[in-house]
């Protein structure tokens, strides 16, 4: 099974990074291929709304998204991990999601699905960590992530969110977060 994970945090070794690592530890690497995209380290331009993908379903901007497109197309499971900034996904996550417009065109304009005919239904996992304690941050970030998952034909996804976690590494002090993420990763490949 091929699993792709998007780390949308700019902070290496931070709470999002730790939570994603815990989820990935729940996946047997001997039986599954895991590709992690650290979005902050990739040169990805924002969507230019140029219309280049409207007719073809192919993005005309030549940057590191060209590595992500085939990975999404081949994925059986998708993990998106992001901090919550200003009640939203991180800019790194959102740039990648916006650049999935070619998949939206392919699915909704050209009636072609990304789902593999011979493979399992796609499933996803959303991991969110935020310093604030208001649920609206999770709700807003989840709405954007749900649109992303729907566009790339992820049938179902689970969300784990942790609020009031701000200082670097503070997720380690949460009573269940790392265990929850580990179990969610293990469950993801067994769906």
Image: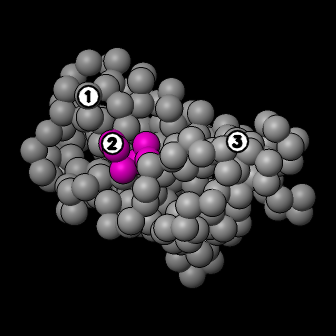
| Direction from residue 181 to residue 116 in the image, left or right | right
Cβ atoms at labels 1 and 2 below 8 Å apart: no
**Which one is earlier in the sequence, the residue at label 1 or at label 3?**
1
For the residues labelled 1 and 2, the Cα–Cα distance comes to 9 Å
How is colour applied across the structure in the image?
Answer: one colour
- Location of residue 44 in the rendering, given as x and y in whole percent from the top left corner: 43, 60
For the residues labelled 2 and 3, the Cα–Cα distance comes to 21 Å
**Which one is earlier in the sequence, the residue at label 2 or at label 3?**
2
- Location of residue 19 in the rendering, given as x and y in whole percent from the top left corner: 32, 53
- The label on residue 104 is 3
Image point 26% across, 28% down: which residue?
A: 86
Residue range (magenta): 90-95
Dot 2 falls on a residue whose secondary structure is: loop
In front: label 1 or label 3: 3
For the residues labelled 1 and 3, the Cα–Cα distance comes to 26 Å
Bin the neighbour count of mark 3 within 10 Å (Cα to Cα): few under 14, some 14-19, many 20 and up. Answer: many
Bin the neighbour count of mark 2 within 10 Å (Cα to Cα): few under 14, some 14-19, many 20 and up. Answer: many
Which sits in the foreground, 183 or 98? Answer: 98
Locate the N terminus by quadrant. bottom right
Dot 1 falls on a residue whose secondary structure is: loop
- Location of residue 32 in the rendering, given as x and y in whole percent from the top left corner: 61, 74
The answer to whether any part of residue 174 appears in the image is yes
Q: Which quadrant of the view contains residue 150?
A: top right
Question: In the image, is residue 78 part of the stretch drawn in magenta?
Answer: no
The answer to whether any part of residue 122 appears in the image is no
Image point 43% across, 43% down: which residue?
A: 94
- The label on residue 153 is none
Dot 1 corresponds to which residue?
A: 86
Q: Which quadrant of the view contains residue 18?
A: bottom left
Residue 36 vertical position relative to residue 80 in the rendered view, above or below: below
Dot 2 corresponds to which residue?
A: 90
Image point 37% across, 27% down: which residue?
A: 138
């Amino acid at each position: 099974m091929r699993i792709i994970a998007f780390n949308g945090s700019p902070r290496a070794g931070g709470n999002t990074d730790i939570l994603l690592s815990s989820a990935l530890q729940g996946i047997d690497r001997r039986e599954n291929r895991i590709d992690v995209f650290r979005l902050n380290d990739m040169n990805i331009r924002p969507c230019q709304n140029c219309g280049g993908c409207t007719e073809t379903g192919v993005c005309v901007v030549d940057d590191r998204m060209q590595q992500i497109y085939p990975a999404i197309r081949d994925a059986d499971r998708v993990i998106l991990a992001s901090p919550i900034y200003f009640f939203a996904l991180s800019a790194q996550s959102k740039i990648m999601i916006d650049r999935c417009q070619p998949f939206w065109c392919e699915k909704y304009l050209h009636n072609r699905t990304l789902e593999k005919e011979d493979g399992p239904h796609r499933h996803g996992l959303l991991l969110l960590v935020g310093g604030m304690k208001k649920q609206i941050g999770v709700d807003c970030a989840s709405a954007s992530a749900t649109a992303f998952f729907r566009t790339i034909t992820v049938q179902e996804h689970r969300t784990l969110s942790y609020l009031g976690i701000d200082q670097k590494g503070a997720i380690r002090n949460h009573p269940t977060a790392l265990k929850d993420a580990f179990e969610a990763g293990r469950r993801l490949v067994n769906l």
